[in-house]
Image (cartoon, rainbow, N blue to C red):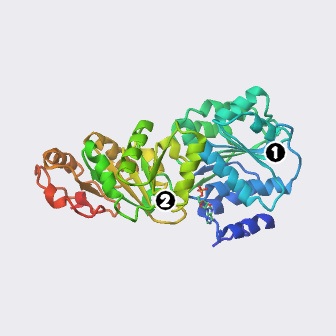
Amino acid sequence: MSTFSDLGLNAALLKSLQAEGYTSPTPIQVQAIPGVLAGRDLLGIAQTGTGKTAAFALPILHRLAANPRPALRGGARALALSPTRELAVQIAQSFKTYGRNLNLTVALMYGGVPFRPQARALSRGVDVLVATPGRLMQHLDEGNVVLSGTEILVLDEADHMLDMGFVRAIRQIASKLSMKRQSLFFSATMPKEIGALAADMLRDPLKVSVASASNTADRVMQSVIHVEPRRKQSILVELFTNPAMRRTVVFTRTKRGADKVARHLEAAGVKVAAIHGNKSQGQREAALGDFRNGRIRGLVATDIAARGIDIDDVTHVVNFDMPEVPEAYVHRIGRTARAGAEGIAISLCGNDERALLRGIERLTRQSIPSEDRRTEMAYDEASVDASRSDDRQDRAGKKFNAPRGKRGGWSARAKRGQHHHSAAMAR
Ligand code: AMP
């Protein structure tokens, strides 16, 4: 097994890693760090939870420290782009934590907060700038930022950049950097447009892939509860009667949905907070803080707001609404089971969401154990629907033997009250 010193990192970095309690590098760190130290471009297929932030922050800090020189006025020697402010804050924090025994400066730029202090922080130049693309573009337009001297560019969560409409901004930003720069590119998935962006941005990249999006789900115990949409609220409250749900992220499709679910849980005496794009930065930070230190048991979030939430020890993820795109399912459940822990993901699936569930099962190449909590009336239709999944393979490679064409053949009553992780479909 390799150690951080085997990877070639300097003593100051090793010291802060030790202080952080990191005993050994994660697979992506083992694969990426030596190449990045040697100056190579990198294409990393990895999602949060794999240790990817350290995989780029450590070798960048090493290289900057090995070759100290002042940044240009308004410039940054290394630039990391993040799709969301939450992730940007975490990346900057990682640079500061790992770099605390080095004499390097780190600055942050993201939207929703005043402009001036950010421009001022950069006026003398910094070693590392972490920014969201929209706000960085504004600063570039204002002439507050100069990127011609930037030596290293990191693009984190590139697929989320695409979802958020940042690809054009990224191309513009990249065009302002010198061609001689080193570029590091991270994405959990590789949709076509992101593959094209990577091809344009990278020169002969080292390719590193850890736990592809379709199998990172392996450490998460997953289940589906089929339920009428109108009963989702009460089932959710019922789920929260389980004291093991200490730190739960509940996902909704819309901001209004998040507020509604949060209100309903609060009314039922479950302490939660909603986070989404309509909340102020202060509200979001307060909610994250309360969640982190256990003052509240749940965060109700939209996909975008939840991105990059870096909270270890999320015990459960609940999909109150099934995600519209199957990749989002993998991102959502990746909020739990981080840094080696086990996690539980429960999805509430309405009849109208069954096609979405099938898409998720196809992408992740698994059949998610399900429980039927619908009332008898709706049940008949469901068994017809469920029997279509005959012959699919489950994760262990077993075949499903759903009763073929036996309408209503499974007793809904018998299934009620079963353990949530029972594989109703697998019998
Ligand atoms: P990331 O994938 O960058 O979001 O990192 C996920 C979590 O793993 C973060 O909380 C890091 O602090 C933690 N982490 C990263 N590298 C290591 C390591 N080598 N040993 C232990 N924890 C780590």
Q: Which quadrant holds the N terminus?
A: bottom right
Label 2 amino acid? Val
Q: Which quadrant holds the C terminus?
A: bottom left
> Tag 1: Cα neighbours inside 10 Å, few (<14), some, or many (≥20)?
many
The secondary structure type at the circle numbered 1 is strand
Residue at label 2?
314
Ligand 1 in which quarter: bottom right
Name the residue rendered at 29%, 61% in the picture.
Answer: 420
Residue at label 1?
126
Please give the label number shown on residue 103: none
Q: Is residue 397 above or below residue 197?
A: below
Farthest-out residue, right: 69
Q: Position of residue 39 (x, y in %)?
A: 76, 52
From the viewer's perspective, is the residue at label 2 or at label 1 nearer?
Answer: 2
Confirm or reject: label 2 Cβ below 8 Å from ligand 1. Answer: no
Position of residue 349 in the picture relative to residue 141 (left or right):
left
Q: Position of residue 51 (x, y in %)?
A: 61, 59
The residues tagged by marks 2 and 1 sit, at their Cα atoms, a distance apart of: 34 Å
Q: Classify residue 157 by image quadrant.
A: top right
